[in-house]
Image (cartoon, rainbow, N blue to C red):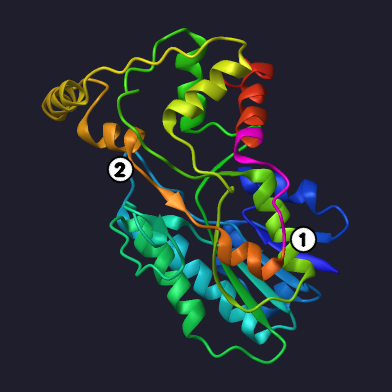
Amino acid sequence: MSILITGSTGFVGQNLIKNLEKFQIKTINRQQLMGISIEDLAHSYFIIHLAGKAHDLKKTSNPDEYYQVNFELTKKLYDAFLKSDAKKFIFVSSVKAAADTVNDVLTENSIPNPQTPYGKSKLMAEKYIESQPLPEGKSYYILRPCMIHGPGNKGNLNLLYKFVQKGVPYPLAAFKNKRSFLSVKNLCFVIANLLEKDVPSGVYQVADDEALSTNEVVSILAESLSKKPKLWAISSVLIKGIAKLGDVFKIPLNTERLNKLTENYVVSNQKLKKALNIDLPLSTRTGLTITAKSFKESPDEHS
């Protein structure tokens, strides 16, 4: 059976192709996606849509770019899928389509309330997919992954790793938080299962089983370096005061950055696991350890 994958050159795409070796894979780039037609989907049994504009933490992007890429291109591809002979459409969205902040545990029943152009554009694409009549024999799966990591990824975990590597103490240990992570291997495992099993169409959150505190993550990173974690529990009141100064003066810590490091963001994966009747291959801690060790093994890439 053949699969059409968009966004194949990205971090998830590269990992996914390695994990789907038994399938015939066709890839298309964003330029081709703009002029997608039913003919482009010929002989493709499955469609996996990874291409999109990622969340810009520096906030330098034009908001309209998110709607053009994350909504309009998804709409074009899904319209072509509906008219084609393809059977399954997997759209990799984001938990940010549901919520930017989470007070309890995020589930698929939570009412979406995205606050950024990125989250709003992803939700628009989700709503469009859900609103179209689905021909018999076809299925769609909207996946909402939380923070994805793995070997080759250069995100926030890599930055935190550098501090631990240099022996810089983590000064926010007084904050007690829990957040969910997702190993790219677990995401690929989920997608492979969706290709092989027939489960109801719908929205599914994807996360590792256990949510961890940032303190626990720092400890895992230190362990991968055979170091003892340096955790400083400086008064949270003092830290918040420094962050407020950072809102005014150009210093590394400001209120938004502090919230990102210390907020709770726990994502439930129970609907997905129940539907597929699976256990994920990697635990949260094992996945993070593998990612951390990849930083150590590739110093040039992560310097």
Name which residue type carries label 2: Lys
Dot label at residue 26: 1
Dot label at residue 232: none
Most foreground residue, 91 or 4? 91
**For residue 259: magenta?**
no
| Residue 16: x %, y % from top left | 72, 50
Residue 171 visible from this viewpoint:
yes
Lower position in the chain sequence, tag 1 or tag 2: 1
**For residue 282: magenta?**
yes
Q: Is residue 31 left or right of residue 241?
A: right
Label 1 environment density (alpha carbons within 10 Å; few <14, some 14–19, many ≥20):
some
Q: Residue at x 78, y 74 (%)?
A: 45
Q: Is residue 46 left or right of residue 231?
A: right
| Residue 264: x %, y % from top left | 36, 44
Using the image, determine if residue 173 lies above or below residue 227: below
Q: Residue at x 66, y 25 (%)?
A: 294
| Residue 13: x %, y % from top left | 66, 49
Most foreground residue, 200 or 127? 200
Q: Magenta stretch: give its range.
A: 278-286
C-alpha separation, residue under disc 1 versus residue under disc 2: 33 Å
Dot label at residue 59: 2
Q: Residue at x 64, y 36 (%)?
A: 287
Determine the image quadrant of residue 175.
top left
Name which residue type carries label 1: Lys
Residue 14 visible from this viewpoint:
no
Q: Quadrant of the N terminus?
A: bottom right
